Image (tube, grey):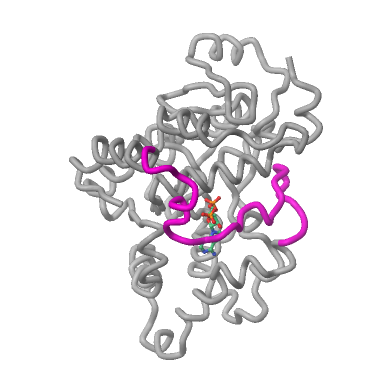
Amino acid sequence: MPNPEQSLSLPGYLQENETSQEFRDLIVSIPTEKGWIANHLHQYQGFWHTTRQLQGVLACQKHFQAQDGDIFLVTTPKSGSTWLKAVMFSLVNRVSFPDTKQHPLLTNNPHALVPFLEMEYIDKENLDFTNYTFPRLFSTHLPLLSLPRSVEDSDCKLVYLCRNPKDIFVSLWHFTNKLRPIAWGASSLEETFDKFCRGVNLYGPFWDHVLGYWKESLERPHRVFFLKYEEMKREPRIQLRRLSEFLGCPFSLEEENSGVLDEILELCSFENLSNLEVNNIGRLHSGEEHQAFFRRGEVGDSMNYLTAEMVEKIDMITEQKLHCHGLKF
Ligand code: A3P
């Protein structure tokens, strides 16, 4: 039964709606827990989704047709998707938009330029992406095993961006608190931390999500480019150059010398994007305010929020789940 108070104010994927019998049969057959904001999270193919978002995932898996040359930015929520959307859009479209003083990013939020695949499919089935300019650029939070079959069957490239789980958790806690109706107050840091560590958060468990793509990037490096938010912050020029090579659009010597890399990085910097008018007013069509995607944009801010015990716990999970696979933060 939809909660009328929720329906008024929450982004679409956090609301619940009327569903088909087939969908209801699926829901009762899979684990369900209370969400951070939404009434329910459902564990599908090992990962947690809200009810409506799961409808989008199923529709996307059924209907999305990938094409050779498609590019997917894959992230877990709060790993820097907004930033990388801006960077990748600027990178692959730099011939069409060479002037960063008159650029689509100055008047469009990055999420409007690079759609979230499974979110697009919420309440829709017949989406037509055929008029997108080549290369088609999409983003998704889907775990590797939940990607539509056509992605595996096509000659696509995947860019996976991940981030230190402590910063992800704190960023997610702030973000979900912004989405909560004011009357509900903030959610407790302790309660959500417990859920995050158990993997019960949107697209969680974080560690399983990362590990799937990490292994794939080792096995098929021509297909999956694995990037950390922290690396991108520390050495943006080097990472942008690597990214351009992976995507098959390397910077020419002339571009290097004329400062194109720096212009892209400046355009997409936290300082620039977060101060643009377009990112301080308005909302995505899914309902989130643009400004909710820009908070501090720093590495290590979680240390201002987590207790020593929390840090120890999350570090231990990371060590147990990822270190043996050679992945450290
Ligand atoms: P913080 O909450 O730690 O500040 P996502 O885009 O995946 O939702 O991630 C949001 C996080 O990325 C937020 O982190 C946000 O501030 C940060 N962010 C947004 N734009 C950024 C940019 N241009 N450069 C660096 N970080 C950015």
Tell me which image quadrant ligand 1 sits in: bottom right
Q: Quadrant of residue 248?
A: bottom left
Residue 297 belongs to magenta span: yes
Q: Is residue 81 left or right of residue 6?
A: left
Q: How far across and how far down the image is residue 53, in percent? A: 60, 31
Q: How far across and how far down the image is residue 242, in percent? A: 33, 68
Residue 282 belongs to magenta span: yes
* Residue appearing at x 45%, y 29% in the figure: 194
Residue 77 visible, this angle? yes
* Residue appearing at x 66%, y 60% in the figure: 109
Residue 152 visible, this angle? no
Q: Nearer the viewer, residue 47 or 190?
A: 190
Quadrant the N terminus occupies: top right
Q: Quadrant of residue 8?
A: top right
Q: Magenta segment range?
A: 280-309
Q: Nearer the viewer, residue 109 or 186?
A: 186
* Residue appearing at x 43%, y 55% in the figure: 69
